[in-house]
Amino acid sequence: MRLLDLAVKNVRRNRLRTALTVAGVATAILAFVFLRTGITAWTSAADNAAADRLSTSHRVTFIMPLPKRYIEYFDGTRGRFEGVDAAAYAVWFGARHPVQTDQFFANFAVQAETFFDVYPDMIVPPQDLARWKETRRGAVVGQALAQKFGWKIGDIVRLEGTIYPGEWEFEVSAIYETKTRAVDRSQFVFHWDYLNESLPEPQRGQIGWIATRVSDPTRSAAIITAIDAKFEGFDVQTRTVTEKAAQTQFLAGFSALLRALDVVSVVILLIMMLILGNTIAMGVRERTREYGVLMALGFRPHHIAVFVVGEALAVGLLGGVLGLMLAYPIIQYGMGRWLEENMGAFFPYFRIPPHVSLVALGLSALLATIAAVLPALAASRLNATEALRRLG
Amino acid sequence: MIPISYNLRSLRVRTATTLATALGVGLVVFVLAAALMLSDGLQRTLNLGGSDDAAIVLRKGADGELSSSIEDNVLGIISAAPGVRKNQQGQPLAIGEVVMVVQMWTQDGRGQSNVLVRGVPERVLEFRPQVKILEGRPAKVGTTEVIVGRGILGRFENLELGGEIELRKNVRAQVVGVFDAGGSSYESEVWGDLFVVRDAFGRDGAVSSVRVRLDSPEQFEGFEAAVELDPRLALQAIPEPRFLKEQSQGTADFISAIGISVTVFFSIGAMIGAMITMYGAVSSRSSEVGVLRALGFSRLTILLSFLLESLLLSLAGAVLGVVAALALSAVELSILNFQTFSEMVFRFHLTSETVLVAALLGAGMGILGGFLPAVRAARVSPIEAMRG
């Protein structure tokens, strides 16, 4: 179609302005992709959380422990729950690196025999796992954490306790990899026995929670009811939730922030529309006489409108493609890697989801069209005589 | 000098373009201001709870009240340390409190979230005079009665006057009063009797933290030395303002970091917008520029005039952005504090620094965006411009 040809040619007429507009759209798309990737990465932990894992803890507060003997109702000593394949207790340790105290990572003491049966998505080589089980002060650390602090198997590492005071010494026995992206690769787990033996008598025999893996996730609700009913008559009552529900609830605490980021990602699209709309409107104003000529030649008003929208669409798409071309090296391989390594607890997997790229491209076309509507209307309402008379 | 009215009129002639550009700048300024206001609001809410002459004592190594525990018998040693102020009856102003976190159902159907429950001793209102009972009455000492901060009131099920909350099986607490704590983070807490609260959670014989009021802020070093002297006690003393700042640092930094990285991207976009507009202005007015040059205005004057125009344009946007951000001050929101994992209610807070940063950002975008177009204007040759 000749008209579209002409529209594309027009794009090349004021090269500087076109280049700037494309750059503006590209920046906006880059920011949009960055924000959406961040929001997705932040919520992905909940989306990808294992549906077959439950966690049982103190009913009222996470800071109070459960008695260790509760595990006996899971492991066969005093019974089992129908449908529960594996169970392991754990307690939050909350220590930090003695020098890099602000580098948060999750660390907890676990039941060594069964922990990795409950968490098969943390993969430890069999010989390393066997060695860890034999090493009293041994620890299994995530691959990202080991890389960050330069730890290798066999290293002696020290952590500074916050809940459990003092300096704690560990030996790195194994490094785990992960199967799925939602799993934090910067966790630090060690023997609950080691912690327990080191504590004064009154603090011993306490666990934070019991994690269980169920064979059939669709039966989770019934299993949850059974577990909590079992402990109803005990001194300390329990509350059992699926891992997914726990994650979702944690995120709900930040829903205000997530909503704010949602709004902000819309704001950048508005800015993009303003830039595009402004460029198109300026072009239309400058070319009023040409439109007059076209109309005098017999083009109808809707032709003129198509002409304007076509130009906007070309610029918008160009900017969108350029923005995505920038987004991949910058977000995917630059910032994403850095965030995964340094903030793995919050962003275990910071990569651009494919649908975000598609949406960004679609939006750059759609918003370009919308931005062109007003200028296009203005142009198509022109009257040939008047347009010709008007001075550029 | 070319009069400023020339620029103002030029901006007015092209209303749509001027508005679009200013709005773009305004949106960027708004986003930055909102992020800074959020992080300031969070810190302010926590800081309001502190006073310069107060200090908090925690177990050594503990990074907050939640992970700290101090034996009751140590309380006497802390109260007797030098520098601790005494009231008219000669009692030291020192209180031991226990801090717990309780899961409750939110009122808006988000599910369960954590609420901070503080077990306070009898003399707490003497120690924190800014706390006032708004509705109802103070809780009776030694009973399961509790009072609720106004910030968190009604955000959770049963957290209202006359409501009942469950501390543990068969231990229910009755809400008998609502308190105001001058906008501080205490307004997001539930206060009950020290002994009742810690008994309900099996934490008898120990408190989470001890707060003391000093004769003057300068007394802190002496107090700290006395408290930290005995290594067996394993205590650490921190001035209250510093402690509160550290408590909110993580969350506040997180918000600022997001805000600033987003603003960097956005301001590039808005700057490009300003550049397009100014290039447009220069090219459509090149014959005018030619006339000005012919009249004897120097290149530098032309350059400055166009820069000024761009600056005016972006400052107008910045004003729009700040005014819009100002409206946010009325918004109250609740997020999880990283340090206590419990809900904290706070407002956006506009400081003069934020206004300054916003204005500088606006001006920066105008000057950077307007510079190249202004150079082009300055290079217009008068003869060519008037001929064309």
Image (tube, rainbow, N blue to C red):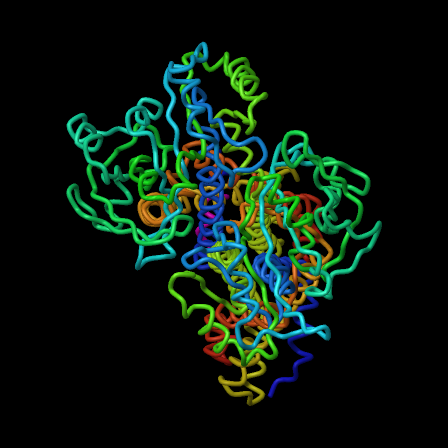
Most foreground residue, B327 or A271 = B327
**Can the viewer see residue A324 in this picture?**
yes
Residue A307 visible: no
Horizontal relation, residue B3 to residue A111: left or right: right
Q: What is the magenta range?
A: A6-13
Residue at 54% x, 53% y is: B208
Reply yes or no: does residue A321 show up in magenta.
no
Q: Quadrant of residue A177?
A: top left
Residue B3 percent across, percent down from the top left = 65, 84
x 43%, y 27%: residue? A210
Give the side of residue B371 with respect to residue A383, left or right.
left
State left or right for residue A23 relative to residue A296. left
Q: Identify whether A99 is placed above or below A193.
A: below
Q: Position of residue B155 (x, y in %)?
A: 71, 41
Does B186 appear above or below B107?
A: below
Q: Quadrant of the C terminus of chain A?
A: bottom right
In depth, the one of A286 and A186 nearer the eye is: A186
Quarter of the figure with residue B62: bottom left
Residue extending farthest to the top is A82
User: Where on the picture, by quarter, is residue A234?
Assistant: top right
Residue A277 image point, x, y percent = 59, 50
Image-based side of A111 in relation to B112, left or right: left
Most foreground residue, A243 or B263: A243
Q: Return the x and y of residue A231 as percentages of the image width and height.
A: 54, 21
